[in-house]
Amino acid sequence: MANVIGRTKKAQPQESPVVETEDVIVHASRLFELNIIAQDAVREFALHDIDDKEGLESKRIAMHDAFTQLYDEVSAFIDQIMGEDFEISYLRDRIGSAEGEAKDQLVAGLKELEEQSQRNLADMWMARVMAWLHQAAAASGPFVEGENEEKKKSSSKHLAAVYTMLEKPFSAVPSKSDGTQKLRRVALGSKAYSLLTESSTPDEAELADILGRNKRSEAEFYDEFLNELIGQESTFRQAFNPFDELVWRDMLSSFIFEQATDLYNEAIPYFDKSKTPDKQRTAMIKSWKQNTAGLSEVYLAMTYNDIADAQMRAGNLEDASGLYQQSSEAFGRAEKCFDEVVALHSNAEQSKSDKDQKKAQALFCRAEASVQTLSDLLEVNNKEEAIKILGDIFKDLKKAEKLAKSRELTAAIKENLRIFSFVEQLLSKKIDDLKSITSQIDFAKDLRKTGLVQTVSKSLDEAGSKLATDPVGSLDAVREGLSSLGILLSLESEDEEVGNLRNRTLAMLNHLKYVIQFQLSSQIQHGVKFILSRILENLHAAEAATYYKVIGETRSADELTDLGKLALATAYASEAQIFSRQSEQWAFRAQIARASAFKKLEDEIAEFEDEEGIENTVKIHDDTIMRIRQTVASFEAATNELNSVKGEEIRQKNNVDQQVKQLQAVVLKFKGDLSRILGARSDFLAEFSSKKGDASKAMVYYSEATDRLREAVGNYTVAAQVFQQMGDAQAAQTVDNRAKTTDLVARGVWDNRQRLDSDQTPAYMGDSELTALYLGTGGQ
């Protein structure tokens, strides 16, 4: 038989991959699940019993682990969809031989690809940084002494992945600071230090200067870059909900500023030992250190405050009081740090104000916690003990009144003082039955509740009126009512009216988050960030819908549920589009790899080499097939999610029925592409087997290729019919042409199988036939 390549020792490549997509993991679906897990983990931590130290620590680590999983998945997703290197290399080759306008277009395309590659690298690196940061924070928590060794090891592993990426030239700038630049300085400084220490006569002053600069760069990485990155992430995730979400942001911020403080402290002695000590530089670093030390305490105070708020709203007033006290003490330490630097005096003043406010909240909660004890004593006519408890309540409230800074807390304290002054007057009289006083207390508390309910309701009404036209103004209105609601929940957590108001507030808050996230999504280009934003839209909408259902506003609940489904369907479709573009690129790549592999095998020395090139070419085919399968699975997920929209008005407004039919046709088209590339893979193996002299195996592969190509023709034909029924004549024509092209290719493949059966040499495909096979175009 002619054109037989010399046999080699390796076994032939493997069987064809499966066509089905049931086992394909849709990344958007996985990210959706991980976001829910992270949300739940935050809430479980914030509401856990603070007396259960072991359980609290377990919940804290679980929260950080959930976020690490999320960011690991984001990083892996970005890594998978990055395919610019091949395109960049291809365009550079073409630019060398192009001229005039064609060259200008190629240069412009190359620039766009290089910029996209830089963005993808930056996003992937920052996702890895966030994954590492959560593990680093998990290793060293604010509620326990010592480090968690398991998390410390995990942190080191994740940090290694962060450093490994720095070998590639890219920048990562959330706002102003380039994190890659900071860490590259650290890495280069460490290498310079290592080389100098290995020299025969290391200069101690020079070594000290290098170590000082290294510590400073690393401190700036925490102080500047990580601070910006956390801010970017919290803004993107709409983490302004004081009911739970702020705690992870505040804990990370406290951690990074603590690390920066330690590093600045380590840097200062080294600079003092350098060849040319610079007092001005040292003074500047000391001021930075005071700032980061103060900020670490500020965010620690906010962490305690976050958990205290959650405990207060749950009616756990004694726990809340203790946590507010810890928050106040942390603000006090921050005040001292800031007060040492003239430029930071405004920060010191703010910290003092916050310290007083949190102390006032601690005293207020302690006083409120004593009210039930007072009522119990009055019920049993224990006047002596009742007077003593009342004295403690007055003592706490009067101290709180002097310290309180917010209008809402001050008003609540004054109201309590008025109520208990009245109780004091009654106790000073000779009353035989003290039980009657409790009814007076209850009556006064009802009046207080009514006033707070009116305040919160007014804020919610204002927020609702601005929701569609002025989301920022709506958010300000909600914030106005949140402080009053927090006080109300601490006093009346079991009250049905108050509970309904809480649910109404949460419905409005999450509805508002959906609106803001929707606006944010419209500003983001398609990509992983866009997919994540659409997922968050869905979660905010679903959360709002849950609370709207509870308060009986089913129309709003149903509408938001459907809007969330539209957002999630868009996320799935966006992922499908990413992989569809990649599948075309990889199909072309497989075509080039096929031609290159046979060219190498036909060289005289080929028979003395192994078949690594063949196996690599098969792998490129498999990678192409994987991307098409991912495309099909993602479009199917989008179709199903879109079709689950129930509201008739929303379906009509968004043309859902037409979109579903279009997506179904698109799925059929890509199933045709999948079968066609599977056929191309089998045809490649058939040609290889034929040229190796294994006719029987080649016939098997040619038969398999023919079957796959016939499947493709069938899918294309049905897809064209659906497009035609929809009135999309252009799409119908394009897919129908692909069906005809693939049919011609299938006939040629079957003819080659018949030739082998007749002991004839197959008519191997030329460039035009390969283009038809791999790209589905031309060849007719």
Image: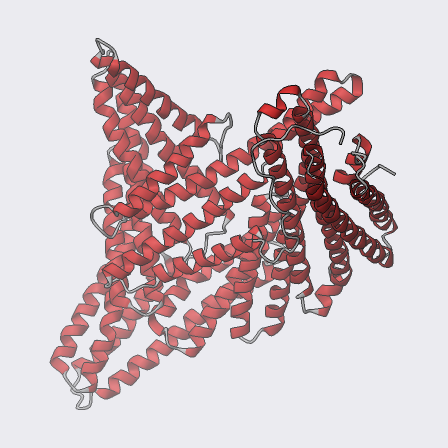
Residue 283, quarter of picture:
top left
- Is 447 on the left or on the right of 9, as rendered? left
- Above or below, 86 against 491 in this view is above
Give the image's coloring scheme.
secondary structure
Image vertical order of residue 394 relative to residue 621, above or below: below
Query: From the viewer's perspective, is residue 420 above or below residue 173?
Result: below
* Residue 10 spot, x, y in % from top left: 56, 35
296 or 396: nearer the eye? 296
Answer whether residue 277 is visible to the viewer in this image: no
Q: Which quadrant would the N terminus be assigned to in this image?
A: top right
Residue 231 x/y as whole percent: 44, 42
Residue 266 drawn at (x, y percent): 23, 28
The residue sitting at the left extreme is 384
Tell me where residue 708 appears, x and y as whole percent.
74, 50
Give me the residue at 19% from left, 73% from top. Answer: 390
Q: Is residue 743 left or right of residue 497?
A: right
**Quarter of the C terminus within the rendering:** top right
Q: Is residue 672 visible?
A: yes
Which residue is depicted at the point 25% across and 34% down?
Answer: 262
Q: Quadrant of residue 486?
A: bottom left
